[in-house]
Amino acid sequence: MIRETWNEALHVIVSDASEARRWIAGLEERERARTALSSLRVRFNRVFGYGIEVSHAQSARVPEDYVRRQTLTGTERYVTPELKDYEAKVLGAEERRRRLEQELFEDVRGRVAAHSAALLATARALALLDVVAGLAEVAHVRGHVRPVVDSGDTLEIVEGRHPVLEARSGEPVTPNDVALDADARIVILTGPNMAGKSVYLRQTGHIVLLAQMGAWVPARSARIGVIDRVFTRVGAQDNLARGQSTFLVEMVEAASILNNVTPRSLVLLDEVGRGTSTFDGLAIAWAVVEDLHDRAVGAKVLFATHFHELTQLAARLPAVRNFHVAVREWNDEIVFLHKVRPGGTDRSYGIQVARLAGLPLPVIARAKALLARFEDQRQATAEAADAVQLGLFTAPAAPDPVVAELAALDPAHLTPIEALNLLVKWQQALKR
Ligand SMILES: Nc1ncnc2c1ncn2[C@@H]1O[C@H](COP(=O)(O)OP(=O)(O)OP(=O)(O)O)[C@@H](O)[C@H]1O
Ligand SMILES: [Mg+2]
């Protein structure tokens, strides 16, 4: 625990013990040379300690300083005063060392504790210096800028970049703008898989956090009206141990956001409503956006989604805007531009991305055929629905026979009994 040269007494214990061990190790050879007794051995016994053993036959020739201790079968056992001295230094050395080290440790601990206030203040100062110097270095090396943080309600980032993506990738990343204010504060972000929606959401969160902790930010410029909380709902996780399925976790998080959001919050929703049936998911996502628009007035929201129907919300809710991440189609391939632009998209290119990911070609081909069929069906369903609606309003159904008979009747030529009979007949017809 403690370096032996740090304390004189500790040093003596450790060096004496090792010297004694060395001395004992050489004893047998030295004593044999001195006595010329071929049977002489140095042995250790846990009860009696170290001893010099000599056969009965040679025991008459042991030197004067040998003191006999035991008679064993075949041998006599001796010690010398010197051997006893050295033995004492070896045996118990470990125990003495441990005890002394504990004492020394407690002493040091006491001395440190006496200065704890000064030491903690120094540690805190160094930690702060470390953080600030770290942020300054990153700002310098990565070309970050000083953001304006004010109490306005504008969130404006010009050419923002994702700080981690940028630090990790060898090539420059594509910068993107964010402009949210009281008039336009909810963005529905569509665009193909792999286009860069999640990156855009997260870099916005990073930049807001960095700005508010006093750091510079990866952007050309940034104005950040103080945000009280950043809410995120990202990715698909479950929490099986706590009895929460994937979709339940998603909804628990969404619920917590809607229940806690304030007019000064930033809400980043990455694909809400994905873990259930398409219509349930779309319905939930739609209602969530409406709630954020109508109730959480002021909150800034970036909502990435593959529910392209949500782009219709921009026409209904005044503070909602559509943006998409652009790609370029080239033959049957797509080229990712990673550029966020105004307006929505209506395609996800999921099958192209699945092919990039290595899904087997027969599966890709089959998926394409199915997609074409599903899209035809949807088209047909839409047309059928239109036809039904048209039918309802333009071509009234044939009149009921009862009504027809009533319309053709001339009441002036009916006797009361005939009228009563007709009434009974019609009522029976209607009951059938
Ligand atoms: N601005 C950017 N500059 C450079 N590369 C980017 C940029 N945005 C995204 N990328 C690259 O594209 C990858 C996919 O981006 P991201 O995960 O944001 O896609 P997504 O639109 O969320 O896709 P999905 O709908 O499948 O979730 C990133 O891992 C990153 O490598
Ligand atoms: Mg994503």
Image: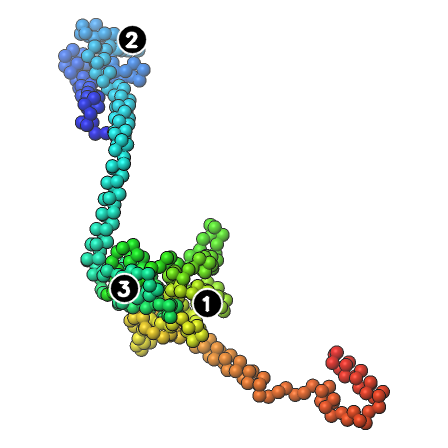
Q: Are marks 2 and 3 in contact (CB under 8 Å)?
A: no
The x, y position of residue 233, in whole percent, is 40, 60
Among the two numbered marks 3 and 1 on one chain, the one whose residue lies closer to the N terminus? 3
Mark 1, residue position: 294
Residue depicted at x 26% and y 19%:
91
Pick the front one: 317 or 284? 317
Mark-to-mark CA distance, 2 and 3: 95 Å
* 346 over 59 or under it: above or below: below
Q: Are marks 3 and 1 in contact (CB under 8 Å)?
A: no
Q: Amino acid at mark 1?
A: Asp
**For the residue labelled by badge 2, is the local secondary structure a helix, a strand or a loop?**
strand
- Give the amino acid at mark 2: Thr
Looking at the image, how many numbered discs can be counted on the residues?
3
Q: Percent from the top left, x then y, of residue 407?
A: 72, 90
- Where residue 147 sits, quadrant-wise, is bottom left
Q: Residue at x 48, y 64 (%)?
A: 276
Of pointers 2 and 3, the one earlier in the residue sequence:
2
- Is residue 85 at least partly visible in the picture? yes
Whole-percent x, y for residue 102 in the image: 28, 26
Residue named by callout 3: 222
Residue that numbered label 2 is attached to: 71
Q: Is residue 364 above or below residue 254?
A: below
Of marks 2 and 1, the one in the foreground: 1
- Label 1 neighbourhood size at 10 Å, few (<14), some (14-19), many (20+)? few
Residue 288: percent from the left, percent from the top?
Answer: 46, 65
How far, Cα to Cα, is label 2 from label 1? Answer: 103 Å
